[in-house]
Image: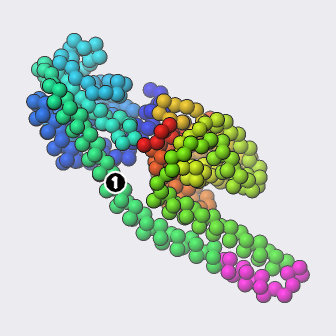
């Protein structure tokens, strides 16, 4: 099955909730029991639907399980994007041949479901009630089922925020230790090399002094880069993005200007085809694309080839889809989610930096109500894709 941008956004949203592993959340079990009681049916379930499977994460009236997406009745909600209620599924063209109706898996007759819609508008599954007997919902029951579906998402959001807060506290402790170590080393080197230079009575007659000054400048540059990354990350962490319409070409022009020296030093070729007007915070968006372009420059292609980077923007029903392609080594599929974590640099641990850049990028994109991911690039390296909504939430 071809994975669309909408599917990737759904899978990313599901991953952020971390709801497919471990025991059922008691609050979710309570909500399905309420749904069954409200609708006067024996069975209710919370379904999470990814690109291949339907996961029943909490249920009443039967044991929750996993089935293929093709067999799921609730996949219809992903297409129609609205609540559905069917008195007799046997006479509904959408469900008549479904194995949950025909008897191959079950004998569903009455069926009703409400979408689980995240705050960003992504449908990740359904709250579903059903019965082996025909039936229907009163308007008040339908409204109640929709409200309970909202409550399911509220529970998932609360769990996510609680988990991320705990993880952030752990990361901040690690972060402080790492910063102390990584900033101390270049600073110590800087002081040492400058002391050597200061002790040289005649720099013109002392090649060692000139070399020491050059090494000091390199150490100072590395320290400056680290401090800049730290400030960017700290600023983004508490940011409330502005809502300004700005030309993407202007944002990219500023980022490329900041990276001009690095681009020339690498002999890189950069192609930009991004005629788009995006809505967001110009400063944060500039940090976003500066990080992405710097990252593409950092990981050079094999065999000494010059870096090639291409930036494109296309309009999508969900927003502007922006891609940054490079011809570098790429990112292994198993690492394409973890590289967005704070202090993670992927398998190439020799790469410079603290592992903050991509984490900063994700913070900026999420602050704008968007999504970000990595896949294989047609250019041979990595493709970072970003989806920025036309009107951020």
Quadrant showing the C terminus: top left
- Residue 339 shown left or right of residue 128 in the figure: right
Q: Which residue is mark 1?
A: 161
Total count of labels: 1
- Residue at 33% over, 37% down: 117
Q: Secondary structure at mark 1?
A: helix
Q: Quadrant of residue 37?
A: top left
Nearer to me, 320 or 60: 320
Magenta segment: 189-205
Left or right of 287, for residue 342: left
Who's the residue at 55% across and 31% down the image? 315
Look at the image and say whether residue 220 sits in the magenta stretch.
Answer: no
- List the single residue furthest toward the right: 205
The image's colouring method is rainbow
Rendering coords of residue 313 (x, y %): 60, 36
Point out residue 66 in the picture as x, y percentages from the top left corner. Answer: 27, 34
Q: Is residue 190 magenta?
A: yes
Q: Could you tell whether 300 is left or right of 374 in the image?
A: right
In the image, residue 269 above or below residue 170:
above
Can see residue 313?
yes
- Characterize the local packing of mark 1: few (<14), some (14-19) or many (20 or more) Cα atoms within 10 angstroms: some
Confirm whether residue 376 shows in the render: no
Which residue is located at x 75 percent, y 56 percent?
261
Viewport quadrant of the N terminus: top left
| 208 horizontally vs 274: left or right | right
Q: What residue is drawn where x is 43% and y is 66%?
A: 172
**Residue 350 in picture, x, y percent from top left:** 61, 60
């Amino acid at each position: 099955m071809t994975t669309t941008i909408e599917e990737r956004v759904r899978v990313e949203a599901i991953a952020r909730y971390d709801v497919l592993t471990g025991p059922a959340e008691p609050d979710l079990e309570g909500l399905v029991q309420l749904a069954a009681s409200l609708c006067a049916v024996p069975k209710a379930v919370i379904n999470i639907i990814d690109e291949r499977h339907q996961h029943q994460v909490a249920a009443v009236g039967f044991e929750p399980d996993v089935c293929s997406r093709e067999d799921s009745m609730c996949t219809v909600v992903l297409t129609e994007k609205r609540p559905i209620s069917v008195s007799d599924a046997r006479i509904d063209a959408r469900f008549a041949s479904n194995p949950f109706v025909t008897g191959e898996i079950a004998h569903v007759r009455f069926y009703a479901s409400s979408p689980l819609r995240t705050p960003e508008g992504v449908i990740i599954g359904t709250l579903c009630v059903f019965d082996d007997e025909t039936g229907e919902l009163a308007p008040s029951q339908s409204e109640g089922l929709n409200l309970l579906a909202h409550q399911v998402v509220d529970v998932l959001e609360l769990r996510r925020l609680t988990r991320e807060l705990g993880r952030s506290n752990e990361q901040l402790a690690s972060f402080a230790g790492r910063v102390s170590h990584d900033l101390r080393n270049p600073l110590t080197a800087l002081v040492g090399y400058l002391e050597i230079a200061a002790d040289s009575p005649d720099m013109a007659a002392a090649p060692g002094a000139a070399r020491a000054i050059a090494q000091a400048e390199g150490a100072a540059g590395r320290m400056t880069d680290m401090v800049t990354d730290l400030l960017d990350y700290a600023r983004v962490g508490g940011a409330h993005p502005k809502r300004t319409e700005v030309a993407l070409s202007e944002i990219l022009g500023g980022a490329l200007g900041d990276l001009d020296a690095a681009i020339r030093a690498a002999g890189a070729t950069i192609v930009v085809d991004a005629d788009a007007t995006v809505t967001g915070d110009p400063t944060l968006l500039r940090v976003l694309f500066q990080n992405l372009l710097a990252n593409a420059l950092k990981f050079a292609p094999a065999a000494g080839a010059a870096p090639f980077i291409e930036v494109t923007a296309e309009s999508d029903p969900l927003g502007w889809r922006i891609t940054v392609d490079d011809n570098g080594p790429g990112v292994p599929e198993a690492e394409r989610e973890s590289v967005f974590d704070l202090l993670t640099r992927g398998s190439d641990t020799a790469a410079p930096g603290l592992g903050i850049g991509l984490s900063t990028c994700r913070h900026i994109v999420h602050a704008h109500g968007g999504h970000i991911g990595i896949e294989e690039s047609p250019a041979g390296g990595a493709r970072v894709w970003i989806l920025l909504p036309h009107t951020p939430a």
